[in-house]
Amino acid sequence: MRSKKMLFTFDYELFLGANSGSVENCLLKPTNKVVALLEKFELHGIFFVDTLYLVRLKEAARTAPKAATDFKLIQKQLVRLLNGGHCIYPHVHPHWLDASYDAELNTWSLQDLSKYRFHSLTEQQRTEAFDQSMDCLSKMLQNSTATFSINAYRAGGWSIQPFSDFAKLFDKYNIIADFSVLGGSRRNTNALSFDFSSIQPNSFPYRFNNQVDSKSPDGKYLQFPISSLAVEADTLTNRMMKKILWRIKHGQNYGDGKGVEFVSNEKPSDYDKHMEMLSIELLTLPKLKQYCSFINDNDYVQFISHPKMLSPHNLLIFKRLLSIMTGLYQLESDWRNINI
Ligand SMILES: [Zn+2]
């Protein structure tokens, strides 16, 4: 049986705009559902946990009982994931530093986007944010029975550039792998900015040194790029399908918050017009064939998904995809077993 390297990465986070939504609907419930599917097929997930949120939640938990309950439930879920052989790593969204908590509603508002990019912090703030993140995550996971090192990272909003903001922090915590590059994409908005246009949308993992988008065979760090495929996203079938599924709720995502509204400073790029990241939350029945042929054509693929964005329909089609793929190929879903 031919083998495929297929990574299932998740950004484990609430909504990052006007209304965070609830822990139950954005994190706990959809994560349990998607993990149950992965485990049915003996596959591993890689979870990038919004660590500055957890830092703020832990703070709020001192005085707010609902926040304390949420923190405990998240900790329980993360420990269970780790014990089940899944990976847990940090994912820093710096604008949590300016988030405000409503103890009554038990939700957060993140309207201030001035710190959205890691680069917008001072060097001292960057160090503090990273230190707090690593400290909080390792303490949360210390009761796990798994032997595990927190040695990989994904930047909030893919904003891993310039990498010089991160290099020292990676070295301080022995982080060797980054998962922030969405090959082929370039974006410049009111909040985030990155340029990965020199990397192919279906690039294999590679090594790098000072720049995440510059391959260097002897590089110190590993880059596991996120895959994108060309889709005819706006076909009539797709649009109709979406409408029907939404109406019968099968296409509605579990998450109950409101995300960031990005305002682009540039005209849509070729990537924006033709490409889409490989994602469970974008996987619908009309796209299943395209996903299958993309995977057939590529020996390495990386999915990026967000539990909060998943719908019952996405999970149903994902199950179908996994059932087809595990019938055809031997799947390697643990990045630590991939040699670069
Ligand atoms: Zn994120």
Image (cartoon, helix red, strand yellow):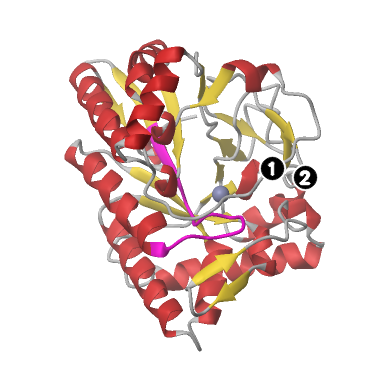
Image position, residue 95 (x, y; %):
68, 60
The quadrant holding residue 337 is top left
Q: Is residue 14 above or below residue 269?
A: below
Q: Are marks 1 and 2 in contact (CB under 8 Å)?
A: yes
Label 1, on which residue?
262
Whether residue 95 is in magenta: the answer is: no
Visible in this render: residue 152? Answer: yes
Q: Is residue 190 above or below residue 107?
A: above
Image position, residue 84 (x, y; %):
25, 54
Image position, residue 90 (x, y; %):
52, 56
Region rendered in magenta = 7-23
Task: Give the label on residue 190, or none.
Answer: 2
Q: Nearer the viewer, residue 338 or 119?
A: 119
User: Which circle's residue, 1 or 2, is located before the other in the chain?
Assistant: 2
Q: CA distance from mark 1 to mark 2?
A: 6 Å
Tell me if 252 is positioned left or right of 111 in this view: left
Visible in this render: residue 134? Answer: no
Whether residue 20 is in magenta: the answer is: yes
Could you tell me the amino acid type at mark 2?
Asn
In percent of the image, x 74 and y 47: which residue is there? Answer: 191
Mark 1 lies on a secondary structure that is loop
Q: Is residue 110 above or below residue 212?
A: below
Image position, residue 176 (x, y; %):
56, 46
Tell me if 99 is positioned left or right of 288 in this view: right
In percent of the image, x 37 and y 77: which residue is there? Answer: 69
Q: Quadrant of the N terminus?
A: top left
Q: Residues within 10 Å of mark 2 (few under 14, many from 20)?
A: some
In percent of the image, x 64 and y 60: which residue is there? Answer: 172
Tell me if 253 is positioned left or right of 92 in this view: left
